[in-house]
Structures are given as structure tokens and as C-alpha cells.
Amino acid sequence: MVTVLTSHACAGSIFTIQNVGRPVVVINTVDVALDLLERRSHFSCRPRWPMAELLGRQKNVGFQYYGERLKRCRKLLHGAIGQSALSTTWSTFLDSQSLALLCRFRDSSEEPYVVISRCVEELLMRFTYGQEPNPEYRKLANEVMHETSIALQPGRWMVNLVPTRAYALLIMYVPSWLPGAGFKRWASSARENFFKLTREPFLEVKRSLNSATAESFVKHALQTCPGAPDDEDIIVSVAGSLYSAGTDTINAVILTLFLLLIRHPEVQERVYREISCVVGLDRLPDLSDRDSLPYLDSVLQESMRFNPPVPLVAHSNWKEESYGGHRIPQKTWVMANVWAMLHDEVEYPLASEFRPERFLPKVGYAPPRDPRSLIYGFGRRLCPGLHFANAYIFLVAARTLACYKLLPQDNRLPPPDFVTGLIR
């Protein structure tokens, strides 16, 4: 059953779907998303996924419920990868990692998309733990991501469908040996994989803390945290969130960008001309050139608008609210439909087309909303790593296009097809 909420917003901007006793509110427009998710702190929680809890994922920043623990995690992240830390601590690191990708393009015999994926994994692993991921760790990380996706599949697990917390807890804590409790046995195995993925590299950094190990988020956090009893647990959770949340999203953004540039060689050529004129040919672009390359920035914006990596952003309210005269019960699932917002024909005319020029500043014309203000989330759930991710994506785009021309394999344009999931 679908009930349209006739609020002050335009028709269809917000509606509810009744799903096995649990209402799901879907937000399709920016104005409503900002009203609820930015301006009302009660919507700063995440929906409950009992299967994700059984996997141990509820301590990750992305899944964690709103409260003091989440505030401490986010404070730690902001101190490590906020705007000021980016320019003072990590700019040289991002510079070297983007350069490594260029060299890998030149030297590797692997497919470019494999090269990109591996370099993004190395970026996050080196930043988080100061280590390079070995094949076993890569395999384990892929298994954990796959198991997390299975745990969150709509309709797959009864424990995720029950309408109240009491029933969910009852199902979650049944003995694993009971008939029908196979989900507990599966979750136990997946939980072991997740703990191994997040704890082993942390412990390795901790053991070598006093030696001349590479600088990393975990090393810095261990050296600077005040020493509360649960500090290490906080650091483990935050570090695990950095790697798991960053790899697939950054990878998706870069692959989308390259796909669109291959399909639009005229855009690629225009970016190259801009870089040649502004930066010259005797050095590579760096972060100081960002404001001087407006067309490249418009291409990045349009690529993220065309295919936002996370098309649906999940929130929940820890207190009952009302909107437009309609009641929103406590712990309602609230889904911000970022894809719909970025394909709004009023804000982005001809939204199904790739048109970077829509974001170029013109006299007497206000460009549409920057998609980067939406794809990283809302309010107190805004991704703390957005400055880090945007800086790396800029360096990869600018430097790749300064050095290479992207061409379709066998002269066949790749179709703009995407796999739909948590990450598109």
C-alpha cells in the first residue's frame, strides 16, 4: 500500500510505502530532504538492520545509531581527514597515490578498471593502516562486502522484516542450533570475517607503534587519543569504516567518470585544452590548480550527478515527528532518493544527458546545485571523508587527462549500464 503525503512540497516529493508492518518514507526532492534530514536532529539515526548487527557492523560509522559513541567517532574522523588536516597532513600522500595510479596505467598489463580498483584499495589501506593490502586481505575485504550486501538484501531475512524491536531481539537471540536458525550460523561466520578484517591490521599497527612505521590514521589516533577505556574500540570501528566505505564509492565515481569521458571525446578534449592552458605541459596538475580549472570541475559535478554512487541514503528518526500535517512515527525508515533529486528536470534540464556545461558559471545565470552537496549524505550523517575523496578524485581526473587519452576498446563505445545496489 502506498500513501502519498500531501505536504506543502510538490506532489510526489515525499510518500510512504507500507512494508510488512514497517512504514518506509521516501524523499524525492532536495527541499524536503533538507527540511527533515538537515534541520531536524531527530532524523540523525540509521534504520535498524538486525542482520547487520549480527555481523558486527552496527559499530561502523555508517551503520551506527545516533548517540555519544557516534559523536566521538565523527570527531576523530573530522580531526584526521577534515579540510585543515587535508592541506597540512595528507596532501603529499594524495599526490603520491594519484601519481602511482598514472604509473600503473603505463606499466601494468591488467585491465584499466582492475588497476583503478586496486589503486583505490591501496589508497585507503595505506591511509588507514600504513600498509599495502596483500592478496589475502583483498580477498577477505571482498568477502566481507559481499556478506554485508547479502545481510542487507530486502526481504531475504525475517529478522530484518519484523516490525518491532522486541520481535527482532527475540529472533536475534534464539540459539543457533534450533531448526530455522540457519541465519544465525551464517551470520556467525560472516562476523568472524568482519572482525578479522578490522582487528588484524589495527593490532599490527599497535604492535609496531614505536618503530619507524608509515604514518597512518590508526597510528596518529593511537598516539593522540586521550586514553579512555574504549578508545581502541572506537579507533578499530572508525578505521574499518574508512576502508569499507571508501573503496567502493571512490571506485564507482572514477569508473563512472572514465566511462562518460570515453563516450564523450569532445568533453575529454576540452578538459585537456583547459589543463594545457592553465597548468602548462611541464608539470602535472596539483591541488592548488582546482579553482583554476572550472570546466574540469563541471565535468566532475556532472559525472556524480549522472550516476550518484549511493542512490538511496537511509536515515531514521529516534523521536516521533510530523511533516506537512502528517505523523512520522518513531524509528521510521526514511530513504533520501538522491538519484531522483539529481535527475530532477526542473533543477537539471535534460537530466538523462551528460552535459557538464550546465555547471559552468555564466553572467546572469546561477548554476544548479552542486551534486557533491547531496551525494555525501545529510545533516549529522554527512560523510566526514568528503574532502579527502574529492581531492583524490580531482587529482586522478586532472592528471589522467593531462597524460592520457581515454579510448574505447576495439572502437566500440561502452554502454552507460550500471549495476544497481547499495553502491551503483
Image (cartoon, rainbow, N blue to C red):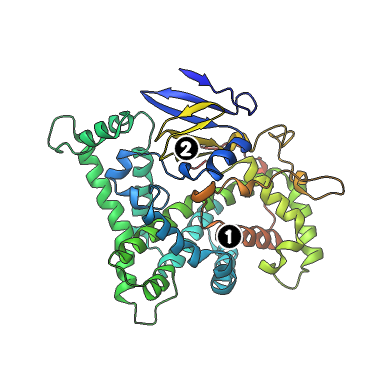
Front of the two marks 1 and 2: 1
Seen at 15% across and 38% down, the residue is 176
Above-or-below relation of 206 to 133:
below
Q: Which residue has dot 1 on it?
A: 387
Q: Amino acid at mark 2?
A: Gly
Q: Relative to residue 163, is residue 314 depicted above or below?
A: below
Which quadrant of the view contains residue 148?
top left
Q: Which mark is residue 421?
A: 2
The first of marks 1 and 2 along the sequence is 1
The x, y position of residue 45, in whole percent, is: 42, 44
Q: Secondary structure at mark 1?
A: helix
Would residue 176 be visible to someone looking at this image? yes
Please tell me whether mark 2 sits on a helix, a strand or a loop. loop
> Is residue 146 found left or right of 368 in the rendered image?
left
**Residue 285 position in % (x across, y down):** 70, 67
In the visual, does 378 lie left or right of 411?
left
Tell me the distance, in whole angstroms, between the alpha carbons under discs 1 and 2: 24 Å
Q: Residue at x 49, y 35 (%)?
A: 335
The residue at the far left in this view is 177
Q: Quadrant of the N terminus?
A: top left
User: Farthest right residue?
Assistant: 363
Give the class, few, some or many, for how many residues have Cα within 10 Å of label 1's Cα (few <14, many ≥20): some
Give residue 202's quadrant in the image. bottom left
| In the image, residue 199 above or below residue 26 | below
Q: Is residue 286 visible?
A: no
Residue 402 placed where, x, y %? 71, 62
- Please report the residue visible at 40 percent of the width from the left and 60 percent of the height from the top: 72
Q: Position of residue 254 (x, y in %)?
A: 59, 52
